[in-house]
Image (spheres, rainbow, N blue to C red):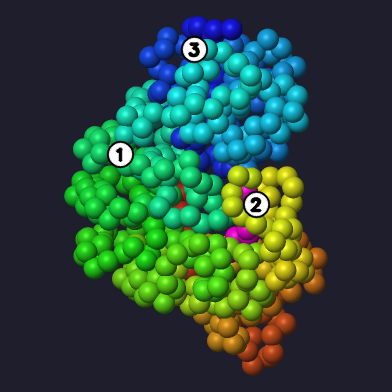
Amino acid sequence: MSIMRKKIALVAINARYTHSCLALYCLKSYVRGLGHYVFLREYSLRRDTDEIAEEIATGKPDVVGLSVYIWNAEMMKRLVPALRRRLPGTLIVLGGPEAGYDPDRWLRGVPGVDCVVRGPGEQGFAHLLAQGPGAGIIDVPNAPFPELPFPYEEADFPGLANRYVYYESSRGCPFRCTYCISSRDDQALEFRPPELVREELAVILSRKPMMVKFVDRTFNASRNHSRGIWSLLLDIHGDIPTRFHFEIHPALLEEEDFEILSRCPPGLFHFEIGVQTVNPWAREEIRRGGEWARERQQIERLVRDGRVRVHLDLIAGLPGDDLAWAQRSFNELYSLGPRHLQLGFLKVLPGTEMAASAPVHGIAWDPSPPYRVRETAWLSADDLNRLDRVAHLVDRLHNTGRFPETFRALETLYEAPFDLYDGLGNFMNERGSPPGRGRESGSAFLGEFIARLQKGDAGPVKMALDRDMRAMTPPRETRITPAARRRGRA
Protein backbone atom coordinates (compact mmCIF):
# COMPACT_ATOMS: atom_id res chain seq x y z
CA MET A 1 0.00 0.00 0.00
CA SER A 2 1.41 3.38 -0.98
CA ILE A 3 0.53 6.36 1.18
CA MET A 4 0.31 9.53 -0.94
CA ARG A 5 -0.57 13.11 0.10
CA LYS A 6 -1.90 12.27 3.51
CA LYS A 7 -2.67 14.26 6.62
CA ILE A 8 -0.02 13.35 9.19
CA ALA A 9 -0.06 14.06 12.93
CA LEU A 10 3.31 13.87 14.69
CA VAL A 11 2.83 13.54 18.45
CA ALA A 12 5.08 13.83 21.48
CA ILE A 13 4.45 13.67 25.21
CA ASN A 14 7.13 15.66 27.02
CA ALA A 15 8.15 15.42 30.65
CA ARG A 16 7.34 19.13 31.19
CA TYR A 17 5.52 21.88 29.38
CA THR A 18 8.77 23.83 28.88
CA HIS A 19 10.28 20.91 26.95
CA SER A 20 9.80 20.32 23.24
CA CYS A 21 10.48 17.28 21.08
CA LEU A 22 13.20 17.91 18.51
CA ALA A 23 12.43 14.58 16.78
CA LEU A 24 9.04 15.84 15.57
CA TYR A 25 10.56 18.91 13.97
CA CYS A 26 13.28 16.83 12.32
CA LEU A 27 10.72 14.45 10.81
CA LYS A 28 8.48 17.26 9.63
CA SER A 29 11.31 19.12 7.93
CA TYR A 30 12.58 15.95 6.23
CA VAL A 31 9.24 15.08 4.62
CA ARG A 32 8.25 18.71 3.98
CA GLY A 33 8.75 18.42 0.23
CA LEU A 34 6.74 15.21 -0.24
CA GLY A 35 3.38 16.95 -0.54
CA HIS A 36 1.84 15.78 2.73
CA TYR A 37 0.12 18.01 5.28
CA VAL A 38 2.03 17.54 8.55
CA PHE A 39 1.00 19.01 11.88
CA LEU A 40 2.60 18.65 15.31
CA ARG A 41 0.99 18.00 18.66
CA GLU A 42 3.03 18.23 21.87
CA TYR A 43 1.66 17.47 25.33
CA SER A 44 3.00 17.04 28.84
CA LEU A 45 2.68 14.04 31.12
CA ARG A 46 0.07 15.92 33.15
CA ARG A 47 -2.50 15.73 30.36
CA ASP A 48 -5.26 13.14 30.37
CA THR A 49 -4.76 10.34 27.82
CA ASP A 50 -8.35 10.41 26.53
CA GLU A 51 -8.23 14.18 26.14
CA ILE A 52 -5.06 13.86 24.06
CA ALA A 53 -6.59 11.12 21.89
CA GLU A 54 -9.74 13.17 21.35
CA GLU A 55 -7.76 16.25 20.34
CA ILE A 56 -5.62 14.29 17.87
CA ALA A 57 -8.67 12.53 16.41
CA THR A 58 -10.36 15.89 15.80
CA GLY A 59 -7.75 16.58 13.12
CA LYS A 60 -8.75 13.34 11.31
CA PRO A 61 -5.19 12.33 10.39
CA ASP A 62 -4.44 9.50 8.00
CA VAL A 63 -1.16 8.78 9.80
CA VAL A 64 -0.23 9.32 13.46
CA GLY A 65 3.45 9.20 14.39
CA LEU A 66 4.24 8.84 18.09
CA SER A 67 7.70 9.57 19.52
CA VAL A 68 8.35 7.08 22.34
CA TYR A 69 10.90 7.56 25.14
CA ILE A 70 11.33 5.99 28.57
CA TRP A 71 9.56 8.87 30.31
CA ASN A 72 6.39 8.61 28.18
CA ALA A 73 6.34 4.91 27.27
CA GLU A 74 3.68 3.87 29.79
CA MET A 75 1.43 6.73 28.73
CA MET A 76 1.94 5.84 25.06
CA LYS A 77 0.77 2.30 25.81
CA ARG A 78 -2.53 3.81 26.95
CA LEU A 79 -2.70 6.41 24.20
CA VAL A 80 -2.40 3.99 21.26
CA PRO A 81 -5.57 1.98 22.07
CA ALA A 82 -7.41 5.25 22.78
CA LEU A 83 -6.41 6.52 19.34
CA ARG A 84 -7.32 3.25 17.66
CA ARG A 85 -10.86 3.40 19.08
CA ARG A 86 -11.33 6.89 17.63
CA LEU A 87 -9.36 6.40 14.41
CA PRO A 88 -9.96 2.79 13.26
CA GLY A 89 -8.57 3.35 9.76
CA THR A 90 -5.57 5.50 10.65
CA LEU A 91 -2.01 4.18 10.36
CA ILE A 92 -0.36 4.40 13.79
CA VAL A 93 3.44 4.55 13.65
CA LEU A 94 5.90 4.49 16.55
CA GLY A 95 9.47 5.77 16.59
CA GLY A 96 12.02 6.96 19.11
CA PRO A 97 14.58 5.00 21.14
CA GLU A 98 12.12 3.21 23.41
CA ALA A 99 10.09 1.68 20.57
CA GLY A 100 12.90 1.46 18.03
CA TYR A 101 15.22 -0.74 20.07
CA ASP A 102 12.58 -3.39 20.77
CA PRO A 103 9.96 -3.06 18.00
CA ASP A 104 8.63 -6.62 18.28
CA ARG A 105 7.56 -6.04 21.87
CA TRP A 106 5.56 -2.97 20.88
CA LEU A 107 3.99 -4.60 17.82
CA ARG A 108 2.96 -7.68 19.82
CA GLY A 109 2.12 -6.07 23.14
CA VAL A 110 0.34 -2.81 22.33
CA PRO A 111 -2.98 -3.18 20.46
CA GLY A 112 -3.31 -0.71 17.63
CA VAL A 113 0.34 -0.30 16.59
CA ASP A 114 0.77 -0.78 12.84
CA CYS A 115 4.51 -0.32 12.47
CA VAL A 116 7.70 0.87 14.15
CA VAL A 117 10.45 2.98 12.58
CA ARG A 118 13.91 2.09 13.88
CA GLY A 119 16.96 4.31 14.15
CA PRO A 120 17.19 8.10 13.81
CA GLY A 121 14.04 7.97 11.75
CA GLU A 122 14.09 10.69 9.10
CA GLN A 123 14.80 8.43 6.13
CA GLY A 124 12.78 5.59 7.61
CA PHE A 125 9.69 7.76 8.02
CA ALA A 126 10.01 9.09 4.47
CA HIS A 127 10.35 5.48 3.22
CA LEU A 128 7.19 4.53 5.11
CA LEU A 129 5.22 7.35 3.51
CA ALA A 130 6.42 6.34 0.07
CA GLN A 131 6.27 2.54 0.34
CA GLY A 132 3.79 1.80 3.13
CA PRO A 133 4.30 -0.11 6.42
CA GLY A 134 5.39 -3.40 4.84
CA ALA A 135 6.07 -6.06 7.47
CA GLY A 136 5.65 -3.62 10.36
CA ILE A 137 9.30 -2.75 11.07
CA ILE A 138 10.97 0.00 9.04
CA ASP A 139 14.75 -0.26 9.28
CA VAL A 140 16.32 2.05 6.70
CA PRO A 141 19.79 3.64 6.92
CA ASN A 142 19.54 7.34 7.61
CA ALA A 143 20.88 10.11 5.42
CA PRO A 144 24.22 11.58 6.58
CA PHE A 145 23.61 13.99 9.43
CA PRO A 146 25.17 17.04 7.69
CA GLU A 147 22.69 16.58 4.82
CA LEU A 148 19.58 16.66 7.00
CA PRO A 149 17.55 19.87 6.71
CA PHE A 150 17.21 22.48 9.45
CA PRO A 151 14.44 21.18 11.72
CA TYR A 152 12.55 24.45 12.24
CA GLU A 153 10.52 26.74 10.03
CA GLU A 154 9.12 30.18 10.73
CA ALA A 155 5.70 28.89 11.75
CA ASP A 156 7.22 26.72 14.50
CA PHE A 157 8.66 29.51 16.63
CA PRO A 158 5.48 31.03 18.10
CA GLY A 159 4.69 27.65 19.66
CA LEU A 160 8.22 27.48 21.11
CA ALA A 161 8.11 30.96 22.66
CA ASN A 162 7.94 29.71 26.26
CA ARG A 163 9.77 26.43 25.73
CA TYR A 164 13.34 25.25 25.35
CA VAL A 165 14.52 25.13 21.76
CA TYR A 166 16.57 21.99 21.16
CA TYR A 167 19.37 21.90 18.62
CA GLU A 168 21.93 19.28 17.67
CA SER A 169 25.24 20.19 16.08
CA SER A 170 26.41 16.57 16.24
CA ARG A 171 24.95 13.09 16.55
CA GLY A 172 26.54 10.07 18.18
CA CYS A 173 29.21 9.90 20.86
CA PRO A 174 32.90 8.97 20.96
CA PHE A 175 32.50 7.23 24.32
CA ARG A 176 31.14 3.75 24.85
CA CYS A 177 29.50 3.87 28.27
CA THR A 178 27.73 0.55 28.68
CA TYR A 179 24.51 2.02 30.10
CA CYS A 180 23.94 4.48 27.24
CA ILE A 181 22.10 4.02 23.94
CA SER A 182 24.73 6.23 22.29
CA SER A 183 27.34 3.54 22.95
CA ARG A 184 25.88 1.29 20.26
CA ASP A 185 27.77 0.70 17.03
CA ASP A 186 24.92 2.23 15.03
CA GLN A 187 25.46 5.61 16.75
CA ALA A 188 28.30 6.96 14.62
CA LEU A 189 29.66 10.38 15.55
CA GLU A 190 28.75 12.99 12.89
CA PHE A 191 29.06 16.79 12.90
CA ARG A 192 27.24 19.54 11.05
CA PRO A 193 29.58 21.86 9.12
CA PRO A 194 30.52 25.06 11.01
CA GLU A 195 29.02 27.37 8.38
CA LEU A 196 25.71 25.48 8.53
CA VAL A 197 25.65 25.65 12.34
CA ARG A 198 26.28 29.39 12.14
CA GLU A 199 23.35 29.89 9.73
CA GLU A 200 20.95 27.73 11.74
CA LEU A 201 21.80 29.32 15.08
CA ALA A 202 21.30 32.76 13.56
CA VAL A 203 17.73 31.77 12.65
CA ILE A 204 17.04 30.42 16.15
CA LEU A 205 18.56 33.38 17.97
CA SER A 206 16.63 35.87 15.85
CA ARG A 207 13.54 34.63 17.74
CA LYS A 208 15.21 35.17 21.16
CA PRO A 209 14.22 31.92 22.90
CA MET A 210 14.77 31.66 26.65
CA MET A 211 17.03 28.61 26.33
CA VAL A 212 18.76 26.72 23.53
CA LYS A 213 19.67 23.21 24.66
CA PHE A 214 22.31 21.49 22.55
CA VAL A 215 21.42 17.80 22.62
CA ASP A 216 24.87 16.66 21.44
CA ARG A 217 25.75 13.67 23.61
CA THR A 218 29.27 15.03 24.23
CA PHE A 219 29.34 18.57 22.93
CA ASN A 220 33.12 18.98 23.22
CA ALA A 221 33.93 15.64 21.57
CA SER A 222 35.67 17.69 18.86
CA ARG A 223 37.50 20.59 20.46
CA ASN A 224 37.60 22.64 17.26
CA HIS A 225 33.86 22.15 16.83
CA SER A 226 32.92 23.17 20.39
CA ARG A 227 35.37 26.07 20.52
CA GLY A 228 34.04 27.44 17.26
CA ILE A 229 30.44 27.42 18.52
CA TRP A 230 31.30 28.86 21.94
CA SER A 231 33.27 31.66 20.29
CA LEU A 232 30.43 32.35 17.86
CA LEU A 233 27.85 32.60 20.65
CA LEU A 234 30.10 34.84 22.72
CA ASP A 235 30.61 37.13 19.73
CA ILE A 236 26.93 37.50 18.82
CA HIS A 237 24.94 37.11 22.05
CA GLY A 238 24.70 40.91 22.65
CA ASP A 239 21.33 41.79 24.12
CA ILE A 240 19.79 38.41 23.31
CA PRO A 241 18.27 36.98 26.53
CA THR A 242 18.93 33.38 25.46
CA ARG A 243 20.93 30.97 27.61
CA PHE A 244 22.74 27.89 26.25
CA HIS A 245 22.97 24.39 27.70
CA PHE A 246 25.68 21.86 26.77
CA GLU A 247 26.59 18.35 27.92
CA ILE A 248 30.38 18.17 28.10
CA HIS A 249 33.12 15.82 29.26
CA PRO A 250 35.51 17.60 31.67
CA ALA A 251 38.48 15.44 30.66
CA LEU A 252 38.41 17.09 27.22
CA LEU A 253 38.74 20.65 28.54
CA GLU A 254 42.09 22.32 27.87
CA GLU A 255 43.63 25.72 28.49
CA GLU A 256 42.27 27.11 25.22
CA ASP A 257 38.74 26.24 26.33
CA PHE A 258 39.16 28.16 29.57
CA GLU A 259 40.54 31.13 27.64
CA ILE A 260 37.41 31.19 25.49
CA LEU A 261 35.13 30.73 28.50
CA SER A 262 36.83 33.61 30.31
CA ARG A 263 34.81 35.88 27.98
CA CYS A 264 31.51 34.29 29.02
CA PRO A 265 29.04 36.54 30.88
CA PRO A 266 27.90 34.83 34.10
CA GLY A 267 25.02 32.43 33.49
CA LEU A 268 25.11 32.55 29.68
CA PHE A 269 26.39 28.94 29.42
CA HIS A 270 25.14 25.96 31.41
CA PHE A 271 27.38 22.87 31.48
CA GLU A 272 25.94 19.48 32.41
CA ILE A 273 28.75 17.11 33.34
CA GLY A 274 28.13 13.40 33.83
CA VAL A 275 30.71 12.28 36.38
CA GLN A 276 28.52 9.26 37.29
CA THR A 277 30.98 7.88 39.89
CA VAL A 278 34.46 8.55 41.25
CA ASN A 279 35.07 4.81 41.78
CA PRO A 280 37.90 3.87 39.34
CA TRP A 281 36.86 0.21 39.14
CA ALA A 282 33.24 1.11 38.36
CA ARG A 283 34.33 3.68 35.76
CA GLU A 284 36.44 1.06 34.05
CA GLU A 285 33.62 -1.48 34.19
CA ILE A 286 31.17 0.87 32.46
CA ARG A 287 33.88 2.20 30.09
CA ARG A 288 33.24 5.77 31.17
CA GLY A 289 36.81 6.86 30.42
CA GLY A 290 38.82 9.71 31.88
CA GLU A 291 40.67 10.12 35.17
CA TRP A 292 38.67 11.55 38.05
CA ALA A 293 41.63 13.45 39.52
CA ARG A 294 42.04 15.50 36.34
CA GLU A 295 38.31 15.89 35.83
CA ARG A 296 38.00 17.20 39.38
CA GLN A 297 40.58 19.90 38.68
CA GLN A 298 38.72 21.03 35.56
CA ILE A 299 35.36 21.11 37.34
CA GLU A 300 36.88 22.98 40.30
CA ARG A 301 38.19 25.58 37.90
CA LEU A 302 34.81 26.02 36.22
CA VAL A 303 33.00 26.38 39.55
CA ARG A 304 35.64 28.69 41.03
CA ASP A 305 35.50 30.98 38.02
CA GLY A 306 31.72 31.22 38.41
CA ARG A 307 30.94 32.22 34.83
CA VAL A 308 29.48 28.90 33.71
CA ARG A 309 26.56 27.38 35.61
CA VAL A 310 27.70 23.84 36.47
CA HIS A 311 25.34 20.85 36.76
CA LEU A 312 26.94 17.59 37.95
CA ASP A 313 25.40 14.12 37.55
CA LEU A 314 25.89 10.91 39.52
CA ILE A 315 24.41 7.46 38.84
CA ALA A 316 23.62 5.13 41.74
CA GLY A 317 23.57 1.39 41.08
CA LEU A 318 26.55 1.02 38.76
CA PRO A 319 28.49 -2.25 38.97
CA GLY A 320 31.11 -2.08 41.71
CA ASP A 321 29.55 0.88 43.53
CA ASP A 322 28.53 0.03 47.07
CA LEU A 323 27.04 2.45 49.59
CA ALA A 324 30.46 3.66 50.72
CA TRP A 325 31.43 4.56 47.15
CA ALA A 326 28.05 6.21 46.55
CA GLN A 327 28.63 8.35 49.62
CA ARG A 328 32.16 9.20 48.57
CA SER A 329 31.06 10.21 45.07
CA PHE A 330 28.29 12.37 46.52
CA ASN A 331 30.58 14.07 49.03
CA GLU A 332 33.27 14.82 46.46
CA LEU A 333 30.86 16.34 43.96
CA TYR A 334 28.91 18.27 46.58
CA SER A 335 32.14 19.73 47.96
CA LEU A 336 32.93 21.16 44.52
CA GLY A 337 30.00 23.56 44.93
CA PRO A 338 28.01 22.97 41.73
CA ARG A 339 24.88 25.00 41.15
CA HIS A 340 22.97 21.77 40.54
CA LEU A 341 23.75 18.24 41.74
CA GLN A 342 21.69 15.33 40.47
CA LEU A 343 21.88 11.89 42.03
CA GLY A 344 20.18 9.67 39.47
CA PHE A 345 19.71 5.91 39.32
CA LEU A 346 20.91 3.38 36.80
CA LYS A 347 18.40 2.60 34.06
CA VAL A 348 19.05 -0.70 32.31
CA LEU A 349 17.95 0.33 28.83
CA PRO A 350 17.04 -2.24 26.17
CA GLY A 351 19.67 -2.51 23.47
CA THR A 352 22.59 -1.47 25.68
CA GLU A 353 25.57 -3.55 26.77
CA MET A 354 24.45 -2.96 30.36
CA ALA A 355 21.22 -4.84 29.66
CA ALA A 356 23.25 -7.84 28.49
CA SER A 357 25.77 -7.78 31.35
CA ALA A 358 23.50 -6.73 34.25
CA PRO A 359 22.63 -10.30 35.33
CA VAL A 360 26.34 -11.08 35.62
CA HIS A 361 26.67 -8.15 38.04
CA GLY A 362 23.64 -9.19 40.07
CA ILE A 363 21.72 -6.15 38.91
CA ALA A 364 17.94 -6.44 39.08
CA TRP A 365 15.78 -3.78 37.48
CA ASP A 366 12.16 -2.93 36.74
CA PRO A 367 10.99 -4.69 33.57
CA SER A 368 8.94 -1.64 32.53
CA PRO A 369 10.16 1.85 31.61
CA PRO A 370 12.18 3.59 32.91
CA TYR A 371 13.90 0.25 33.78
CA ARG A 372 15.26 1.60 37.06
CA VAL A 373 17.66 -0.50 39.14
CA ARG A 374 16.07 -2.33 42.08
CA GLU A 375 19.17 -3.83 43.69
CA THR A 376 22.68 -4.92 42.80
CA ALA A 377 25.34 -7.21 44.20
CA TRP A 378 26.69 -4.11 45.98
CA LEU A 379 23.51 -2.21 46.92
CA SER A 380 20.40 -3.62 48.58
CA ALA A 381 16.89 -2.34 47.94
CA ASP A 382 17.07 -0.55 51.32
CA ASP A 383 20.35 1.11 50.30
CA LEU A 384 18.75 2.38 47.10
CA ASN A 385 15.72 3.68 48.99
CA ARG A 386 18.08 5.54 51.30
CA LEU A 387 19.88 7.06 48.32
CA ASP A 388 16.54 7.94 46.77
CA ARG A 389 15.62 10.04 49.80
CA VAL A 390 18.97 11.82 49.62
CA ALA A 391 18.53 12.46 45.88
CA HIS A 392 15.05 13.87 46.43
CA LEU A 393 16.12 16.24 49.19
CA VAL A 394 19.19 17.49 47.33
CA ASP A 395 16.94 18.37 44.42
CA ARG A 396 14.29 20.00 46.61
CA LEU A 397 16.59 21.89 48.95
CA HIS A 398 20.07 22.32 47.47
CA ASN A 399 19.25 22.75 43.79
CA THR A 400 16.58 25.40 44.37
CA GLY A 401 19.23 27.62 45.96
CA ARG A 402 16.65 29.02 48.40
CA PHE A 403 18.40 28.21 51.69
CA PRO A 404 22.13 28.94 51.23
CA GLU A 405 22.84 30.24 54.73
CA THR A 406 20.80 27.49 56.37
CA PHE A 407 22.78 24.77 54.67
CA ARG A 408 26.11 26.43 55.30
CA ALA A 409 25.19 26.36 58.98
CA LEU A 410 23.88 22.79 58.88
CA GLU A 411 26.97 21.50 57.07
CA THR A 412 29.17 22.55 59.99
CA LEU A 413 27.29 20.09 62.21
CA TYR A 414 27.99 17.01 60.08
CA GLU A 415 31.16 15.19 59.16
CA ALA A 416 30.22 15.04 55.47
CA PRO A 417 27.45 16.43 53.19
CA PHE A 418 25.95 12.98 52.66
CA ASP A 419 25.43 12.62 56.41
CA LEU A 420 23.40 15.84 56.47
CA TYR A 421 21.06 14.79 53.66
CA ASP A 422 20.86 11.26 55.02
CA GLY A 423 19.75 12.73 58.34
CA LEU A 424 17.16 14.84 56.57
CA GLY A 425 16.01 11.72 54.71
CA ASN A 426 15.60 9.76 57.94
CA PHE A 427 13.61 12.64 59.42
CA MET A 428 11.39 12.76 56.34
CA ASN A 429 10.87 9.01 56.59
CA GLU A 430 10.01 9.18 60.28
CA ARG A 431 7.39 11.86 59.78
CA GLY A 432 5.75 9.81 57.04
CA SER A 433 6.15 12.14 54.06
CA PRO A 434 7.31 10.02 51.10
CA PRO A 435 9.44 11.64 48.39
CA GLY A 436 7.42 13.63 45.91
CA ARG A 437 4.81 15.18 48.20
CA GLY A 438 6.56 18.55 48.24
CA ARG A 439 6.22 19.50 51.91
CA GLU A 440 9.89 18.70 52.50
CA SER A 441 10.92 21.46 50.12
CA GLY A 442 9.86 24.34 52.36
CA SER A 443 10.96 26.25 55.42
CA ALA A 444 8.46 24.46 57.69
CA PHE A 445 10.18 21.12 57.07
CA LEU A 446 13.59 22.63 57.78
CA GLY A 447 12.22 24.39 60.86
CA GLU A 448 10.95 21.09 62.27
CA PHE A 449 14.28 19.42 61.54
CA ILE A 450 16.24 22.26 63.17
CA ALA A 451 14.01 22.12 66.24
CA ARG A 452 15.25 18.57 66.87
CA LEU A 453 18.90 19.60 66.94
CA GLN A 454 20.76 20.04 70.19
CA LYS A 455 19.97 23.38 71.78
CA GLY A 456 23.43 24.85 71.21
CA ASP A 457 23.33 23.90 67.52
CA ALA A 458 19.72 24.84 66.80
CA GLY A 459 20.07 28.55 67.60
CA PRO A 460 22.60 29.55 64.91
CA VAL A 461 20.90 27.37 62.30
CA LYS A 462 17.48 28.87 63.12
CA MET A 463 18.95 32.36 62.71
CA ALA A 464 20.38 31.34 59.33
CA LEU A 465 16.96 30.05 58.24
CA ASP A 466 15.38 33.35 59.32
CA ARG A 467 17.90 35.25 57.18
CA ASP A 468 17.14 33.03 54.18
CA MET A 469 13.42 33.56 54.67
CA ARG A 470 13.84 37.34 54.81
CA ALA A 471 15.94 37.22 51.63
CA MET A 472 13.13 35.34 49.85
CA THR A 473 10.44 37.83 50.96
CA PRO A 474 10.17 40.80 48.60
CA PRO A 475 9.96 44.23 50.25
CA ARG A 476 6.43 45.48 50.72
CA GLU A 477 5.52 48.10 48.18
CA THR A 478 4.13 51.38 49.47
CA ARG A 479 0.42 51.29 48.83
CA ILE A 480 -0.91 54.33 46.97
CA THR A 481 -4.50 55.03 47.96
CA PRO A 482 -7.08 56.34 45.46
CA ALA A 483 -7.21 59.63 47.41
CA ALA A 484 -3.44 60.09 47.16
CA ARG A 485 -3.58 59.30 43.47
CA ARG A 486 -6.24 62.01 42.99
CA ARG A 487 -4.14 64.52 44.94
CA GLY A 488 -1.19 63.73 42.70
CA ARG A 489 -3.22 64.49 39.59
CA ALA A 490 -4.42 67.72 41.15
Residue displayed at 38% across by 65% down? 250
One can see residue 11 in this view: no
| Position of residue 158 measured from the top left corner of the image (x, y, whole percent) | 41, 28
Q: Residues within 10 Å of mark 2 (few under 14, many from 20)?
A: some
Range drawn in magenta: 343-349
Residue 262 figure quarter: bottom left
On-image quarter of the N terminus: top right
Q: Nearer the viewer, residue 261 or 141?
A: 141
Mark closest to the chain's N terminus, 2 or 3: 3
Is residue 345 in the magenta section?
yes
Q: Which mark is residue 355?
A: 2
The answer for how far apart the CA atoms under marks 2 and 3 are is: 35 Å
Q: Residues within 10 Å of mark 3 (few under 14, many from 20)?
A: some
Mark closest to the chain's N terminus, 1 or 3: 3
On-image quarter of the C terminus: top left
**Residue type highlighted by circle 2:** Ala
Q: Which mark is residue 192?
A: 1
Q: Nearer the viewer, residue 136 or 153?
A: 136
Residue that mark 3 sits on: 130
| Position of residue 122 measured from the top left corner of the image (x, y, whole percent) | 45, 27
The answer for how far apart the CA atoms under marks 1 and 3 are is: 27 Å
Nearer to us of marks 1 and 3 is 3
